[in-house]
Image (tube, grey):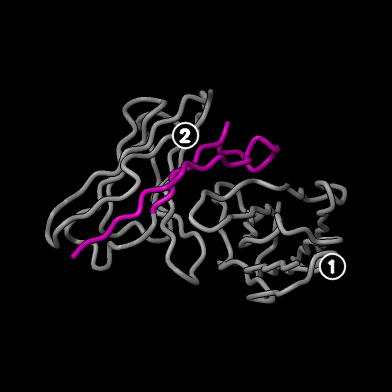
Amino acid sequence: DGGITQSPKYLFRKEGQNVTLSCEQNLNHDAMYWYRQDPGQGLRLIYYSQIVNDFQKGDIAEGYSVSREKKESFPLTVTSAQKNPTAFYLCASSIAHSRRDSSYEQYFGPGTRLTVT
Amino acid sequence: QQPVQSPQAVILREGEDAVINCSSSKALYSVHWYRQKHGEAPVFLMILLKGGEQKGHEKISASFNEKKQQSSLYLTASQLSYSGTYFCGTVENQAGTALIFGKGTTLSVSS
């Protein structure tokens, strides 16, 4: 079955530690995205990647880093510089990052709930 | 620019109708609608493209007024399964922009 996997579902870390969230897709999609979801805030874009070895900052990239070494993988690192890291993190992918056709539909993974204490 | 959704919450009985609105201060190329159930991932409902027609999905349809930068989602004869949070996402006319989501509208349908 094709889809997006995120692991783990729940993650607990101590303040000051970096943590990496996994996102893998087998949909052969070129574009991948990371969103952060907080209650009442909707989905806020952290980073996105249109193609391997290329990525762009979203609205709230500070304190986060990403890599895109393989088409199917787009890990997100939450660094100690992120002041409020506790949140629900969603990864998504689309066929292409093109506003000109319906292939822009995004498919979401199940999410990782990160708690930092 | 994050689109603005209204209302923030809607409470319905089964069979009732609802309208959720999404507006932007920017010229838009497309509007996307997603539904998220509690604790789950958002699921794509439909895309409305600039110059395109009104779209439909089961008893859920939507319109896109390009001149007003507004979109409305129409839920007809609501079912219990329609409960969840509805998000609109907008893509601005400017090339290279990403999909920006609104804060969501929570819909609760009871029997």
Q: Which mark is residue B97?
A: none
Q: Which mark is residue A4?
A: 2
Tell me the magenta residue range: A89-117
| Residue drawn at point x = 71 percent, y = 75 percent | B11
The amino acid sitting under disc 2 is Ile
Q: Secondary structure at mark 1?
A: loop
Above or below — where is B100 with respect to B68?
above
Cα separation, mark 2 vs mark 1, equals 33 Å
Above or below — where is A42 with respect to B9?
above
Structural crowding at the residue carrying mark 1, measured as other residues with C-alpha within 10 Å and reported as few (<14), some (14–19) or many (≥20): some
Of residues B96 and B35, the one nearer the viewer is B35
The amino acid sitting under disc 1 is Asp
Structural crowding at the residue carrying mark 2, measured as other residues with C-alpha within 10 Å and reported as few (<14), some (14–19) or many (≥20): many
| x then y, percent, for residue A45 | 45, 55
**Same chain for the residues at labels 2 and 1, yes or no?**
no
| Residue drawn at point x = 65 percent, y = 59 percent | B88
| x then y, percent, for residue B76 | 86, 60
* Residue carrying label 1: B17
Examine the structure image and report whether residue A87 is included in the region drawn in magenta: no
Residue B29 visible to an observer of this rendering: no
| Residue drawn at point x = 26 percent, y = 50 percent | A11
Examine the structure image and report whether residue A97 is included in the region drawn in magenta: yes
Q: Nearer the viewer, mark 2 or mark 1?
A: 1
Residue A105 visible to an observer of this rendering: yes
Q: Which quadrant does the C terminus of chain A fall into?
A: bottom left
Picture quadrant where residue B92 is located:
bottom right
Chain letter of disc 1?
A: B
Chain letter of disc 2?
A: A
